[in-house]
Image (spheres, grey):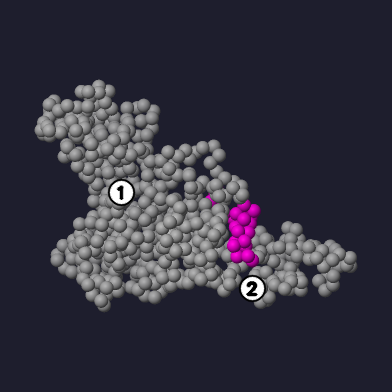
Amino acid sequence: YRDYCVLGAGPAGLQAAYFLQRAGRDYLVFERSHAPGSFFAIYPRHRKLISINKRHTGKTNGEFNLRHDWNSLLSHEPRLLFRRYSRQFFPHADAMVRYLEDFAALLGLRVQYDTAIVHVTLEKDPRAWNGHYFVLSDQNRRSYRCSCLLVATGMWVPNVVNFPGSEYVEGYETVSTNPEDFAGQTVLILGRGNSAFETAENILGVTNFIHMVSRSRVRLSWATHYVGDLRAINNGLLDTYQLKSLDGLLEGDLEDLAIVKDKKGKLHITLRFYLENRNTSAGADSVTLPQDELDNFATRAPYDRVIRCLGWRFDFSVYNRSLRMVPGRGNKSKYPQIKPSYESRGTRGLFVLGTASHSVDFRKSAGGFIHGFRYTIRAVHRLLENRHHAVPWPSTVHPITQLTNSIIKRVNEASGLYQMFSVLADIILLRENATAFEYLEEYPVGVLAELETQTGRKAPDGLFVVVMEYGRNFSGDDKDVFYYNRAVGEAQHAWQSNFLHPVIYYYKRLPTEREMRLRPPDWPLPRPDAIHHIVEDFLTDWTAPNAHILPLRRFLENCLNTDLRQFFAESCFLFALTRQKLPPFCQQGYARMQGLAGSKRLQRHAVEAGLLEDYAATGFSGDKLPDSRQGSRDQVLRDHVITLRPLQHLVNAKDE
């Protein structure tokens, strides 16, 4: 018996094991192979990963650098950063195998190798956490029981399309990777994803020509902003197609195709309906081909080889019907149905992690890839900690005067928000009549309505939700993302930003489940009481005082009906003498004898920056008012009450 059973010791399974081990939980990982990461020992077939390994960013902030490290798993161990395993921007897959082996070994994760779980069923028991145990059986008929099942087996069953003649098709999983085996041949590739283009790229220079057929048009990742679409590293065939060098792309439903083989071993493409009421084993000479009626039929030339590169699907075969693990609908049918919390829709306590959980954000974000699911797995772990061990979602509490700084810090550093845009969000819960706030990081927005039960935190006084988003109409198969005026630079036009940028939603109360269901199409959240876009930035550096920080601060002030500015002690002193209520910064700082200690250097810097008057030059001493008393008290305040800009712009960071 184990409290937690994890299926699969790939990246997702090891990441889940890491969090369970750090929390001191009772768990065991089952892996059918003799080592972790067995998928990467075989795939990709041509051994080049398309997940980037950016070793240098010009910054030393580890959280920021994870934004551009798509291979590392999350851990406390600095030795387990992927940049220590490869110097290549697109690493060799063997480096990933070594990395995962070290990740499991150095952290002492509990993995039981050579154990293939072949059947999973339920055993009802009221003593179990969820009212049932999961019973797992391995290839040797040994049984294991657990209260919570974490499925991290990935997608490894090849997608196959059956049509007449499909027995002549070679699979991506077995086709030769030696380009010389294709020298002088004519090749047809079925599929249009990265595996199809990876295969084409490998043989592009030795074949007569390559044709590629799929039911959908090619989708370029730079246009869709989805990393699962075609990446530039593999798109050489697009060049040879558009520059008329014999290769080409075609669209058509693969289920309507048929393949017949002639006496010379050549493969001819025809249509299924031509073979109706005919002997399907007949040769090409006795079968009507499309070119017999249409002499310029596109695929009239015979092929030497046909290769299937149609991707992968989830293996449902090991799960008993009692678990109700069913495929999704439409283009998500290759994934199991799960909730936005990554829990199975059919069985409580069964969570799907890693690539197989991508149905939550399919074709929207990065949840199907290491640089995305490392964060969603951490979110699932936090949900489980609250549900089963009464450990609330981690949070920090700050005075309201730190609200602007907290948001600016997170949108400039946080890797989870950046990679899982529109899926994970920072939640800011207002406290104590909006004089303080509680900050929760990287919570799944799909279960925002369940925040109080899922996190153990209360939201009685309203909340802010911080997410990263692309522009609404910027991403798509047919979008020209390089048009002339594609970027927005003015803060007043921030809502029209196209590139990834922070968006802050304000709700006076927690949205309901009904509001979540009825949210506008392509919106991650329901319509808020107020919304603010921080204007996109070419450097993804949202620290400009006028373009980024000032508009954000004013938005927060309008939502909270308060003053979030920071002041010098002199200004707070004058406010105390002349106003009934001090601004929050003065209440929480000056009035409590807290703040930045003054010095001659700081005073000189403030005078040079125009933030304070040079009293030494005017002969004004601190214990008496200026000689000119003709002005009103309001005029005195206007002369001497100076708003403090954000601290980094007041103090010279290099000197202080």
| Quarter that holds the N terminus | bottom left
Instruction: Indicate whether residue 548 is drawn in magenta.
Output: yes
Q: Residue at horizontal 82%, vertical 68%? A: 633
> In front of the other: label 1 or label 2?
1
Q: Of all residues shown, which one is farthest toward the top?
A: 295
State whether the magenta stretch is mostly helix, strand or loop: helix
Pointer 1 local density, CA inside 10 Å: few below 14, some 14–19, many at least 20: few
Q: Is residue 59 visible?
A: no
| Quarter that holds the C terminus | bottom right
Name the side, left or right, on which 632 lies relative to 234. Answer: right
Q: In the picture, residue 271 is in which quadrant?
A: top left
Pointer 2 local density, CA inside 10 Å: few below 14, some 14–19, many at least 20: some
Task: Give the secondary structure at mark 2.
Answer: helix
Q: What percent of the width, then of the height, locates residue 415?
A: 46, 57
Q: Residue at horizontal 76%, vertical 62%? A: 612
Q: Which residue is mark 1?
A: 330
Name the side, left or right, on which 477 lies relative to 486. Answer: left
Q: Which residues are magenta?
A: 538-562
Q: What percent of the width, then of the height, locates residue 169?
A: 20, 39
Task: Give the secondary structure at mark 1.
Answer: helix
Q: Is residue 652 above or below residue 263?
A: below
Q: Which residue is mark 2?
A: 588
Name the side, left or right, on which 643 lies relative to 519. Answer: right
Comes first in the chain, label 1 or label 2: 1
